[in-house]
Amino acid sequence: MNTEDISASEQQGFMEDESFPAGNDTERTDNPQSDKISELSKEGYQFLKNNKITEAEDAFRRILQLEDNNNYALVGLGDSERKRNNFNEAIRYYLSCLSYHPGNNYALFGLADCYKALNQYHKAIEIWEQYLVHDDRNITVLTRVADAYRKIRDFKKSKELYLRVLDMEQNNAYALIGLGHLHYDFKEYKDALYYWSKMLEINKDAVDIRVLTSIGNCHRKLKTFDQGISYFEHALEMDPDNFYALFGLADCYRGMNQQYRSIEYWNRILKLDPNNKVILTRAGDAYRNTGDYKTATQYYNKALDIDFDIYAALGLALICKGEGKYEEAVDRLSNLIRNDPKNYRLYIDLADCYVKMNRKQDAMTCLETFQKQGIRSQPINEMLDKLRNNRPLF
């Protein structure tokens, strides 16, 4: 898990899609069979609405006994399988319906949603765009297509469709949230902040915790940590165990160099998830930065007992360095470099150990070794320049 990517983007199923009710408006006729089909159709969709899937399927299959390839029954069976997350089975029913009833909107919508659930966004887009040819002002479809374009990282088309929705409905929640996700995904955090803040303003009386943590995450990315804290605190008031709020607060205090305050929130996460290797390492970093090497070592070792973690291993090396055990620190850092030769930070710390051991030439050689890989690193260049010109390192 890359903690820098713990974001609003996709957290906790942020964007709940509105669902398309399948049709059950069969016209009343004097034909007893048609009346029975209409009755069973209404029963089936009511069962689906109440999440009684087995009963719904029974009603739809009874329709097929009365009329082969009935569109309501085939769509209903597709919807039933989709509710069970059996997307490939659902697709089979929707395609069957479309083979007998081309252009059936409910089958198209269900089919597109299945492709979306299977991450086959190009297929979903193709289907939704077929519908937009006939109805280009359907806000629900427009937001779905915008979402799909966002998933395939087509920024221009996604934004264009979200903005078209906002032109039709100024405060449409799905478009605002989608624009927030879109800009966040492309690291345009100020724009993401604008749209999510607007969402918060519109829903003052019914604040969504995911909007709060999303705004807080924008401030984390913008390094305006002090401004993010209030949003994460508000989220914790709503849900004291919310991972994103706890992580956000810990990371904000870390960014403000208030490590002693971040420790509280790292530990609150660990109470809920004691074997979270990333959080154990973050907590270890916080204890190390407060000078509590003993506790930091315990956290790093617990993380390493779960699985190798380069940051936990680096933390142990930095503790050796902090305790003046430079030879051991050099050994640990050298081993890490062998496994991760392109990590510039390891060379910086190793060179610093050599300097503290009065081995300036070894420090310079270490930094030059990194440069020979052809990787550009400003910190490496600056440290080497200071060593060559006998200037203070820090």
Image (spheres, rainbow, N blue to C red):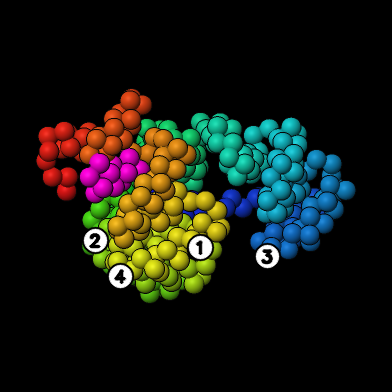
Q: Which mark is residue 261?
A: 4
Q: What's the residue at 44%, 55% (across, down)? A: 312
**Residue sitting at the far right:** 65
| Structural distance between the alpha carbons of marks 4 and 1 | 21 Å
Contact flag, marks 1 and 3 (Cβ < 8 Å): no
| SS at circle 3 | loop
Q: Earlier in the sequence, mark 4 or mark 1?
A: 4
Residue type at tag 1: Lys
Residue type at tag 4: Arg
| Structural distance between the alpha carbons of marks 3 and 4 | 47 Å
Residue 280 on image: x %, y %: 45, 62
| SS at circle 2 | loop
Callout 4 environment at 10 Å: few (<14), some (14 to 19), or many (20+)?
some
Q: Quadrant of residue 41?
A: bottom right
Q: Earlier in the sequence, mark 1 or mark 2?
A: 2
Depth check: 107 or 358 in front?
Answer: 358
Q: Which mark is residue 302?
A: 1
| SS at circle 4 | helix
Contact flag, marks 3 and 2 (Cβ < 8 Å): no
| Residue at the disc numbered 2 | 256
